[in-house]
Each structure stands twice: as structure tokens, then as C-alpha cells.
Amino acid sequence: MQLSTRHLLGIKDLTPGDISTILSTASQFKEVLQRPIKKVPSLRDVTIINLFFENSTRTRISFELAEKRLSADVINFTASSSSVAKGETLLDTVNNILSMKVDMVVMRHSASGAPHFLAQHIPAAIVNAGDGINEHPTQALLDAFSITEKTGKLKGTKVAIIGDIMHSRVAQSNIYLLKKMGAEVTVCGPPTLIPKYISRALNVEVSYDLKETLEWCDVANVLRIQLERQNQVLFSSLREYSLAYGINRRMLDNLQKDIVIMHPGPINRGVELDSDVADSKQSIILQQVENGVAVRMAVLFLLSGGRNPSDN
Ligand code: CP
């Protein structure tokens, strides 16, 4: 089993076949993770560095756990406690690390395109763990895995992506993936948080009406407001945002069906989601996190040229 690409920089570069291969390999790893002994030798003697130049809870722990379950040697790098703080460039930092015989790089960076830049200059395989407002490919893959697990399919499933679409790498990766796999996608949020030409550029529907969108969808993937990426005022206050686009229990109870609620985390409770929605039976937020480990195992395994994971 092989992917058509040497790195995972974005969903944009993957074929539908690549996506199916990753999702089916992740299913096999999910089965491995139910066993009493969860560790397999697939990446023994492979050394992976997790380079995080931006904060993370879920992605970082999930990659580290995936690497350890695959028996890789794992090194964690945090920019704030490194020589980056003394002015070392990204390329110098990474070349120094690679000279110590590191095979794969998992990288999160606040600059869109940072992993793409690195891929042009270093020989190691790179996995993008989120770059600026560009892509978060493993999040979209674990979201797709979780939707399939819950609804049985991606093709024809109506997925609403709700919130700050403009600044969200999760939104962009999800849109690429869902459209490639035949899902129907609507983005919903205030006009100031939805890029003007998204409908034409990415072939999605746009709605500014939350109630209408919830009535239409099977799955609502709810995003947080990315205040750290906004350099101008795009809505009057979080309270105003919450009144127009926050999802509460009453709204879900008024629908004629049970929709699936997703969120990539971290949640701003009481802003985009009330707790009685985030913690309800309709929410699969913690299943998304659980599935992230199997999906990241699949990505690392396939990029290292893996054979059938059942052979482990
Ligand atoms: N979903 C996600 O990327 O979460 P973290 O920022 O905690 O990694």
C-alpha cells in the first residue's frame, strides 16, 4: 500500500484513492488499538521528530501516541524552549536535527506554507500538523473517519461547517476532502468570516442562516473563532456571535432529526457550542480525538512505505 505523495502537506495533494487507503488503513489500526497489547513493530528503527512551533494539545499528543504505538523513536521539539528563541532559522533548525539521523518530521507552524517550504529543502518525509490558515490534513482525515463510522458513508452526506471559515485550516482541509469523496458541503457563519469567493473556488454552498443550515445537514462540524489569527474586528462581540451562530440544546430539539455534532477542539464553551450540546449523545467530539490516533498511525505507516498492518 502506497500513497501518491511522499509527504502529507495537505488534502489538496491527495487523490480520492489516497484518502480511501488512509481511511481503510486507519480502520485496521483502530482494531489494533482495541487489543490488550496496542503496540506494533511497524516503525521500529524509524526516528520521528514532532516540531511544534505553535500550541497544541490534541494533535501533538495524538501524533506522539501514534508514533509510540508504531514503535518509532520519538523526539519532541518545542520552539519556545529551543534555539529558535536565539534567532536560528527554521531551515537551520531542521537541518541540524536531521543531521542526527531523523527520518520523518511532523510539523505545526503558524506560517501558512511552512511545511511546503521545508519539503523543498530537506530529504525527510514531512507531515503537516497544521500550517497557519492553510491546512490541517490529519484533522480532516480523522473527521472523515469519524463521519464514516457514525453515518456509514461520506458520499452524499450533508456536512455543514459552521463558524470562522476565513481563518480555519480545519475548514479548508475538510472542504477539500469532503468534496473529493462526494459529500455535500455548506459553510455557514457571518459574512465577515466567510471568504467572498469560496463558493466558486471550492464548490461549496454558503449560508448565513444557522437555523436553515442545521435543518439541511446530517453533520454539523462546528469551529471556534480564531481570535489569534484575526488582525481586525470582524464581529461586534463574542456575545453577539454566540447569539447568531452559537448552537444550543433548544435548536437541536426543534429539528425533526438527530444531527451529528463535531468540533475539532479546543471548544469555547458557551460561544460556538453550549455544554449541553458538546456533551450530548449527538456529539462525537471525543470519538474524533480517539480516532485521531489510528488515523495518524495510518498516515505515518503509509508514508514510511508500509505493508499490510494486519501482518503486525
Ligand atoms: N484540533 C486541534 O488541532 O487541536 P490542538 O490545537 O489542540 O492540536
Image: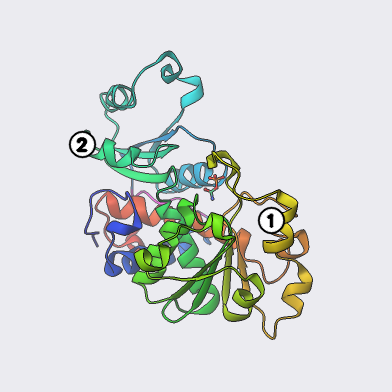
Whole-Å distance between the Cαs marked 2 and 1?
45 Å
Q: Is residue 18 left or right of residue 258?
A: left
Q: Residue 210: percent from the left, percent from the top?
A: 64, 70
- The chief SS type of the magenta part is loop
Nearest the viewer among 11 and 138 is: 11
Q: Quadrant of the C terminus?
A: bottom left
Q: Residue 131: percent from the left, percent from the top?
A: 41, 43
Type of the residue with mark 2: Pro
Mark with earlier residue (2, 1) = 2
Q: Is residue 256 above or below residue 70?
A: below
The residue shown at (40%, 37%) is 111
Q: Is residue 132 above or below residue 307?
A: above
Q: Is residue 271 left or right of residue 134?
A: right
Q: Residue 126: percent from the left, percent from the top?
A: 31, 42
Q: Residue 252: percent from the left, percent from the top?
A: 72, 75
Q: Is residue 95 visible?
A: yes
Which label belongs to residue 200?
none
Q: Which residues are magenta?
A: 37-42
Q: Residues within 10 Å of mark 2 (few under 14, many from 20)?
A: few
Q: Secondary structure at mark 2?
A: loop
Q: Is residue 188 left or right of residue 311?
A: right
Which label belongs to residue 241?
1
Q: Is residue 82 above or below residue 153?
A: above
Within the image, what quadrant is residue 273 found in? bottom right
Which label belongs to residue 123?
2
